Image (cartoon, rainbow, N blue to C red):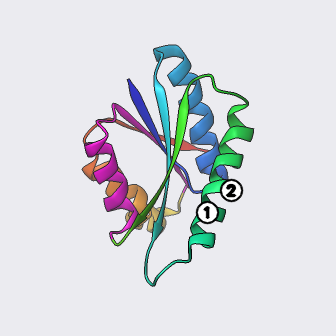
Amino acid sequence: MKFMVCYDGSDEAKEALKVAQNHASTWNAKLEVVNTIVRMEPLKHSQVKKAEEKLDKEVQDLLGGDDPPYETQLLLTDLTPGEQLVKFAQEDKIDQIFLGIIKKSKVGKLLFGSTAQYVILHAPCPVVTVQK
């Protein structure tokens, strides 16, 4: 099994990673921890490398080892983050997605957050939303 964690470094994403770690251990699944960078203009290689290293370090510190097995993915895209995350889940045959969300006011609930809303509505598999 493969579980995907949508990770942006927020407290909610960190909580989603912890929940995914527990589920992956129970189900003997591999974690794909994914972050996206939208290319509005050309990116320097050093910027990409720095972002990859930051992602690797944060995830390693949070998971505290290689159990369950995991990989980090930094996706460079011209699509919106939501579109890219759904596309990755489809192409990588992800079985479940973990996504941290922020509790919103009534008006905020209407908008919900474009990335989270897009992933929830278009994901090819179940989505677990996690609040901090």
Residue 7, visible in the rendered structure: yes
2 with respect to 43 (left or right): left
Q: Residue furthest bottom?
A: 41
Q: Earlier in the sequence, mark 2 or mark 1?
A: 1
Pick the quarter of the image with the N terminus. Answer: top left
Q: Amino acid at mark 2?
A: Lys
94 with respect to 100 (left or right): left
Disc 2 is placed on an element classified as: helix
Q: For marks 2 and 1, give the CA distance.
A: 9 Å
Q: How many marks?
A: 2
Could you tell me which residue is drawn at 43 percent across and 76 percent down?
A: 39
Q: Amino acid at mark 1?
A: Lys
Pick the quarter of the image with the C terminus. Answer: top right
Instruction: Give the answer, above or below, for where 113 lies relative to 126.
Output: below
Q: Position of residue 115 (x, y in %)?
A: 41, 61
Residue placed most toward the observer, 112 or 121:
121
- Badge 2 local density, few (<14 within 10 Å), some, or many (20+)? few
Q: Position of residue 3 (x, y in %)?
A: 43, 32
Residue pointed to by mark 2 = 54
Magenta highlight range: 79-103
Residue 9, visible in the rendered structure: no
Q: Which mark is residue 49?
A: 1
Residue placed most toward the observer, 87 or 129:
87
Residue 94 colored in magenta in the image: yes
